[in-house]
Image: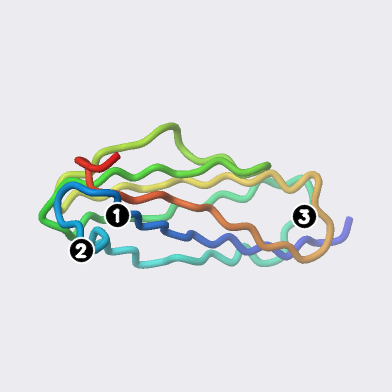
Amino acid sequence: MSPLALAVALSLLATDAGGPPTDRAPRLFVPVTHHDAGDVVRGQEVRHDFLIRNDDEWPIVITPSYRAAIRTPDPSRVLAPGESLRIPVRLSTRHYRGPSSKTVFVRVRFADQR
């Protein structure tokens, strides 16, 4: 089996749809937005946890998206100011060959926004 080079990136989609501050997106601390798993044997599951902390004075809602082959935690989660959340990402490599890069999108909004 040939190794599979894999990188996973975390993209934050900050939305502003009304509610507490309407002139800016929520303030977050995300220490690492990219994970390079290096060479991976086809069929191996790649695992990595991304950390997000709410550095705003308002509660925020974190909603990971689902993509083919990438598993992230279930539905939205409200984070109080100063609270952190680890987003575990799991990727099955059984259908991949050669270098590959995958992105996990996370929607972030103030808790009072829709």
Which image quarter: residue 26? bottom left
What residue appears at the point 31 percent right and 37 percent down from the top-left corner?
77
Q: Secondary structure at mark 2?
A: loop
Q: Earlier in the sequence, mark 3 or mark 2?
A: 2
Around disc 1, counting alpha carbons within 10 Å, would you say few (fewer than 14), some (14 to 19), or many (20 or more)? some
Give percent across and percent down for residue 47.
Answer: 56, 49
**Secondary structure category for the residue under label 3:** strand
- What's the distance in space between the residues labelled 1 and 2, CA to CA? 8 Å
Residue type at mark 1 is: Asp
The residues tagged by marks 3 and 2 sit, at their Cα atoms, a distance apart of: 46 Å
User: Which residue ends up furthest to the right in the rendered image?
Assistant: 1
Please name which of the two marks, 3 or 2, marks the residue nearer to the observer: 2
Q: Amino acid at mark 3?
A: Val
Label 2: how many residues lie within 10 Å, few (<14), some (14-19) or many (20+)?
A: few
Residue situated in front as seen by the camera: 24 or 45: 24
Nearest the viewer among 24 and 4 is 24
Residue 5 vertical position relative to residue 111 in the rendered view, above or below: below
Earlier along the polypeptide chain: callout 3 or callout 1?
A: 1
**Pointer 3: what residue?**
41
Disc 3 crowd, CA 10 A, few/some/many (<14, 14-19, 20+): some
Kindly state the secondary structure of the residue where label 1 is placed. Answer: loop
Q: Earlier in the sequence, mark 1 or mark 2?
A: 1
Q: Which residue is mark 1?
A: 16
Q: Quadrant of the N terminus?
A: bottom right
